[in-house]
Image: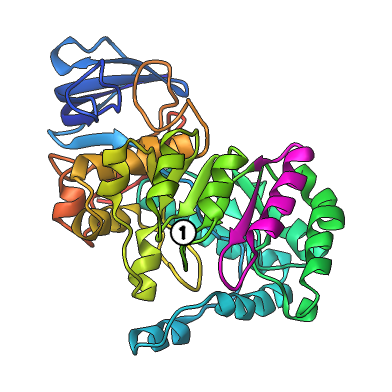
Amino acid sequence: MSIAITNIGSLVTNDQSLGSGILGELTNAALVIENDRVVWVGNSAQVPDADQKIDAEGNAVIPGFVDSHAHLLFAGERSKEFQARMKGEKYSAGGIKSTVAATREATDTELEQNLLRLVAEMQRSGITTFETKSGYGLTTDDETRALAIAAKHTTETTFLGAHVVPSEYSGREDKYVELVTDEMLDSILPYSKWIDVFCDQGAFDVDQSRQILQAGKDKGLLPRIHANQLTQGGGVQLAVELDCASADHCTHLSDKDIEALVGSNTVATLVPGAEFSTRATYPNAARLVDAGVSVALATDCNPGSSYTTSMAFCIAIAIRDMGFTPEQALWSATMGGAKALRSNDIGSLSVGKSADLVVLKAPSYLHLGYRPGVDLVSQVFKSGKSIYQEQK
């Protein structure tokens, strides 16, 4: 089965050999999907025959968004906490523990239904690949069941047993680290691809984080890290030391942190929804991009500090408040996310890549920032199959 999408006003390929600028943009373009792959890209007037044709009517087509950082396995909500922050109270990692209590009480069915609700929101907003973490159970059984549920719906699953130290281990932090790196790690191995740790004030220090990530690596998991969200600490340096795929948040960075990232394979993943929801200072994306750091944008969807599934919203904030150009923001939400997941198959629309794409209700990707808060998604394809289409 082949599908030709024709009359594309602006096609973002993220392949500079195909089009102009960092987005490899083509105008008056078309592409052909066969099965789950992109098999042809070019001028709309030269499109080859296909079993089905879709007329984009001059609208833009972009790669599917790649959300490389989300926390979708939870129960409950924390709107009162949001209200308090908007009144001036400072955010800390402590609010996570209220979600832990609700998640432990939830059934498997309740957790899965909530996950599916959020995934449906993501798909409607153009996200075609998402990562999700555990981290709201913090017992061996609860972390394992969360990841078992997640693994049914994405291959990008992350063990975050080291989110915070649960209340029952207060004053016995080393014992909890021992649990995470031993019994808990062994239990989740069939269901997780990645291992993560919240390396920051109020969570885990650098030595504890190194111990946890190294234990995961020794068992075959790939490392990523929550780093430098609340303070300027050693999380980014540790990420580079351990070859983490990404250092996420990166709100507080020193010149040495940036120098380390430049010479590494570690992507700096920025999550503007978190700064928006916590009234924190936004990181300076231009500083990273200008230095040559690979940058990703992600939603950080979670019930406490970034309860959004909209990548377009994050793009708009990144452009308005973080120093991104529109081109850089879109690249980071697509190709940057793919790099943060170390995937060569997604994030772009060149020949041979997975046919993950979004048809917009706008003539240009610029409208993602130009029209903040407006639903601009007409149709979403994942591996060549339509997973969302606007009802007309």
Quarter of the rendering containing residue 14: top left
Tell me: 265 left or right of 6.
right
Quarter of the rendering containing residue 96: bottom right
Q: Is residue 261 visible?
A: yes
Q: Is residue 79 above or below residue 329?
A: below
Quarter of the rendering containing residue 163: bottom right
Tell me: 273 left or right of 53.
right
Helix, strand or loop at mark 1: loop
Tell me which segment is drawn in magenta.
195-222
Q: Is residue 64 visible?
A: no
Q: Where is residue 267 shown, x and y percent of the image?
A: 45, 41
The residue that appears at 61% across and 81% down in the rendered structure is: 98
The residue that appears at 19% across and 45% down in the rendered structure is: 325
| 330 falls in the magenta region | no
Q: Is residue 286 above or below residue 384?
A: below
- The residue most toward the right is 183
Residue at the spot of label 1: 300
